[in-house]
Image: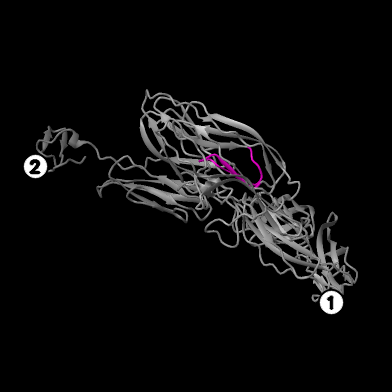
Amino acid sequence: MRAKNPSSHTLRLSLGAAVVAVLLAAIPIGAHAEDLAPAVVPVVTSAAMPPGTVGEAYDYQLTSNVSPVTFSVSGLPDGLTADAGSGSISGTPTTEGEFAVRLEAIGAEPTESTQVRYDTVVIAPAPVTVPVITSPPLPAGTVGVVYSFQLTSNVSPVTFSVSGLPDGLIADAQSGLISGTPLVDGEFAVRLEAVGGGPAGDTQVRYDTLVVDPAPVTVPVITSPALPAGTVSAPYSFQLTSNVSPVTFSVSGLPDGLTADAATGLITGTPTVEGEFAVRLEAIGTGPTGDVSQVVYQTLVIALEESARPVITSGAPPTATVGVSYSFQVTADGDGLTFGAGGLPDGLTIDPTSGLISGVPRVAGTFSMLFRVVDAAGQLGGQHQSLLVEPAVPVITSGPLPDATVGVAYSFPVQSSVPRVRFAATGLPSGLDINVITGLISGTPTIAGAATITITATADGVTSAPWTDTITIRAKGTPPVTPPVFTSTPPVSATIGAAFSYIPTVTSATRVAFALTGAVPGLTFDPATGRLSGTPTTAGSYTLTIVAANGALTTTSQTFTLAVSVATSPPPTPNPPVPPATGGAGGGSLPSADPASQAGPTGRGAHDRSASSATLADTGASSSGSIAAGLAAVLLLAAGAAIAMLSGRSRRRA
């Protein structure tokens, strides 16, 4: 036995004569029993080493019954190493087989005993991976359209074998890329094989169905511009074109002297007759499902020689506006001319005798027009022009805002010259709001005072000029406003071409605003004064209603029917002639039939808001001392002379 902390003391024991024993030991004085325990031999206590596989990570931990301990390991297969300090065996085996591995655990004391253990480690060969095609099924293709698809596999390197592809497609054996442009349609059974580099040359075969659709059928379209005009006896040539090739052209309706080549589409020849010809043009292609074609009709104008036919001399027409009267004079040289026009905007017409284009455009846009003129000899002239019709600019047509009262319901319709507008208002007093669609200002005012309101109307992206007015809101308890009362009698008849004017008179304690329902062609309405004036242009019976509002809970209306008739005969020339008015230009003029032109500084009757009644009337005097009010009838005679006749009455100032 070995004792710890030995000293130089020696103890000899004598047991008599029978036993003589000399015990030599270095036993320290004061030694304990545990100090005399036997030394522990280091032993490898971990389980037997597990098997491994070539190419797969290996990890094993040695353990011992003592610590600290150092491990000694030898005989490991290639690719594995052991850590002497930790006892960890790790790595990736590179060689298969059975290996006798020597394992030894060494304690910290050099003189200590050790124990050696031998384990057998079996390293299995690497598994053979069968190549598998992992890419999705082959997508469909189309004849004439570039195709590309990438084959993939679960191993690398790998070689691909592909067969059964449609004409136009090829496969790269190394990369697995299938590409090209299919030439035929149909369903194709494609054999796909991935060949790996394993010892047995393992492979996997897959069959995909590749669908190739037919090439899309393109309908041939005539892409050449419109047929240009030609001239009698002048060579003509025009090339038809199409969006596909090859294509065959079918042309019919050509004037005498012109022919078309069906293969090339070239129209050539020398026209022998003038006129407008409806030419049928057809482009015929050949598709997979049979012949397809597109037919268009174009107008070919063949005119006489330049020196013989009439020429339109007017320039480009000016811009028009929706809802605004428009006129443009088409002019041409020659005698006995008759005019025509194609492509005019809705609302415009041309006078075949004078060539005057007139009317009121109804739709905005750019219109391509063809002006035509025929002279007395039947010779035709033409001219293409474009007309821009701009959207109408809305105008607020409402009269002045009537007064309101705190706590009393208020309603006032804002009106626009253009339908289907959106209204916007600023400065509305507390309690009032505007309906952006109908333009109705309504509500119940809550605070007395005056408020300045600004209103705009927008249609088709065009906004009106601001319309501004001041509304007076009277204090609560103010006597209610009495609705206005009409005191004038409306006219019942008018004559085409004769000036017309009617200004209603009303009694009201507050300012009055007017509105009109119904319309008469040629007449306009002023909502501020209620004046209906102008020159009627169309015969008929028209029902009109003039509404007057002054802030009362109810409005007052005057409904009447105006019969517009055609003048039966020109009136005789006055004798003696009407003397010219002072300040008139030229040798004589008619007195104005517009009462507003004879009124005071404001051009209309004054509104007295403090008076118990307000009368809208025409008053005033000419510089000669006479006052005239009436209607001036102006008739255009067949000879083109204008004869004016004054009908009415005259009063002399006292």
Residue 243 in sight from this viewpoint: no
**In front of the other: 654 or 569:** 654
Q: Percent x, y for residue 557? A: 57, 30
Element marked by disc 2: loop
The 10 Å Cα crowd at callout 2, few under 14, some 14 to 19, many 20 or more, is few
- The disc at residue 235 is 1
The answer to whether 564 appears left or right of 262 in the picture is: left
Amino acid on which the number 1 mark rests in the picture: Pro
Residue 213 in sight from this viewpoint: yes
Which quadrant of the figure has residue 515? top right
**In front of the other: 502 or 378:** 502
The answer to whether 5 appears left or right of 557 in the picture is: left
Give the mark nearer the N terminus: 1 vs 2: 2
Q: Are marks 1 and 2 in contact (CB under 8 Å)?
A: no
Residue 60 within the segment the image draws in magenta: no
Q: Is the residue 568 above or below the residue 200 in the image?
A: above
Q: Which residue is mark 2?
A: 9
Q: Residue at coordinates 15% horizontally, 34% vertically from top-left?
A: 32
Q: What stretch of residues is rendered in magenta?
A: 518-535
**In front of the other: 624 or 88:** 624
Q: Percent x, y for residue 41? A: 30, 42
Q: Percent x, y for residue 621? A: 50, 48
Which quadrant of the figure has residue 26? top left
Q: Percent x, y for residue 526? A: 54, 43
Amino acid on which the number 2 mark rests in the picture: His
The 10 Å Cα crowd at callout 1, few under 14, some 14 to 19, many 20 or more, is few
**In front of the other: 184 or 30:** 184
